[in-house]
Amino acid sequence: MPLQTPPISSRIKSFIPILQWMPAYSVNFLKWDVVAGITLASFVLPESMAYATLAGVPAYYGIYCCLVGGLFFALFTSSKHVAIGPTSAISLMIGSTVAAMAAGDTHKWLSIVSLVTLSCAAIYFIAFLFRLSSLVNFISDSILLGFKAGAALSIISTQLPKLFGIEGGGGDFFSRIWNMVQHLPQTNIYVLGFGLLSLFLLLLGDRLFPGKPISIIVVILSIIVLSVTGWSQLGIRITGAIPGGLPSVQLPSFNLQEINGVLELAFACCLMGYIESISAAKTFASKNGYDIDPRQELFSLSMANIAATFFSAYVVSGGLSQSTVNEKSGAKTPMSLIVCSFTLCILLLCFTGLLHNLPEVILAVIVVHAVAGLIRIKELKRMYYLSKLEFGVALIAVIGVLTFGILKGVMIAVVGSLVFLIIRISRPHVAVLGRIGNTDIFSDIERHPDNTTIPGILILRIEASILYFNAEHIQDRIKEIMEQYPGEIRMVILDLSPSFYVDVSGSSMLLQLSEKLKLKGIPLKIVEALSTVRDILRKQGMEEVIGKISRKVSIQDAIEAFNQSNKSLD
């Protein structure tokens, strides 16, 4: 019976999840979502403004990101807890890359940012159409760990001059640090003291009230202090006027022919944004017992970035920190994001004047405090203990980001990871197997010296797929093992159970090996091969040389058959 096509209404609802959960929305959830939304708004307000300064756009763009991006994301997301907005890594990536492209032209800077945001929306949508959500798997945990640590150090280096009240400069981490060291004698002790006190309050708040939006309290206190005192005359810069009212709908202005490198930047932003979004979504879905649709999240990010493009915002994605605040505040549905957006609307309509005296050093401190948690020393130590190779990949990511910037650093880490993976696969282990006790089970003699060998029978296990770039190494290792074998070899058994795939070159190598052994009067038996492997070996003509290749034949079966044939000859 043919499958029936779902009705159009069901298909529409699958793309717009709010149409599924809103009709069944429980009034009991409302109080939780309202509390979570207001709490989230108080958290993202200072954080988003701080991140906007990293991107080189006006601070209020960060508020627009959370307002518009969060509202549209709530309509399409399959997650109940992911909160959307600007992120530190993407903001710095945009700021550092666009700085070179815009060459100091403010109008061009904003135009490029709009084009990058629109490009991100397009990339997310194309990835959604072609079901490319699995491509994120190319970024390993080791790359992500190193990238976050490198990005955090790079971001901190951009904010330290603001903390010390000196002029910043430098295109990469090391030049920024050197520039700061040269200007340390010019440190404004009032700015530094104000910043360190604020940082202390943030750290104290984390310890006493974990998960609470302490940053908004620090912001309010700093505004009050500068409003009632004359400290602004001591060199403490303020954010200044923030436009009142809601962001207006406007077409982005850009000239495609004048802008180069936008797609490269957009791809990097999408990759980082989707990784962080889907990681947060999976974390909270698992914790709270529901499922998310990774493909649908591509669509929700696309819609959120389209909205950001036309409402004076820039690239948005899910962030782990704001999502954690949302979940811990009791959010039950994406309604909390809608409440957050309306809370920010009220702020923009009625209270922007209160933000006039917000010290810039406070935004720098909030950034430093937020990204410091990305440097996870314990996890790096654990990775070093578990795998020196993957720790090396993480280290490449750190050094790449610090030396070449976030955009190129990530690409270098990805390439480095793939190179290490290819190197490892190109030199697979070929194990010599022996019998475990009186059983019919065989394992690596090198790891288990107590295993017993079968006289005259060499049993090998190739512990990788056999491919064009490792076939020669496998052949050489088999030759070395045979030369070192004590006594006469009367039979060779190859256990191919770990070999998930054998390509044309690999199957040709096995065929040549079998023919060489046959000329020496040594029969070769292949056991435990998977179906795809058996198919290509048969097409290569292996069965004409070594006999039938069956999935039912084990190592013990091959030994017994060989012994039986020798007895019959005797």
Image (cartoon, rainbow, N blue to C red):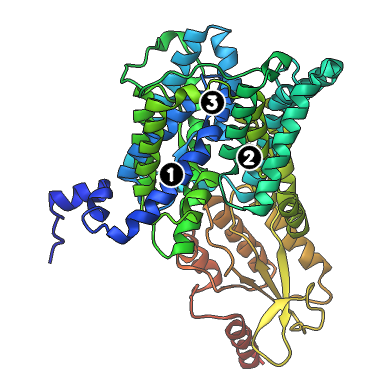
Residue 387 placement: quadrant: bottom right
Q: Is residue 10 above or below residue 251?
A: below
- Residue under circle 2? 370
Q: Nearer the viewer, mark 1 or mark 3?
A: 1
Dot 1 or dot 3: first in sequence order is 1
Report the disc number at residue 87. Answer: none
Image coordinates for residue 188, horizontal then vertical, percent: 79, 19
Closer to us: 452 or 48: 48
Q: Nearer the viewer, mark 2 or mark 1?
A: 1
Q: Residues within 10 Å of mark 2 (few under 14, many from 20)?
A: some
Report the disc number at residue 38. Answer: 1
Closer to us: 43 or 100: 43
- Residue under circle 3? 52
Query: Could you tell me how many numbered marks the image carries?
Result: 3
Q: Is residue 53 above or below residue 485?
A: above
Q: Residues within 10 Å of mark 1 (few under 14, many from 20)?
A: many
Image coordinates for residue 527, horizontal then vertical, percent: 56, 74
Image coordinates for residue 360, horizontal then vertical, percent: 63, 23
- Which three-letter amino acid code belongs to the residue tagged 2? Ala
Closer to us: 294 or 63: 63
Q: Secondary structure at mark 1?
A: helix
Q: Is residue 381 above or below residue 418?
A: below
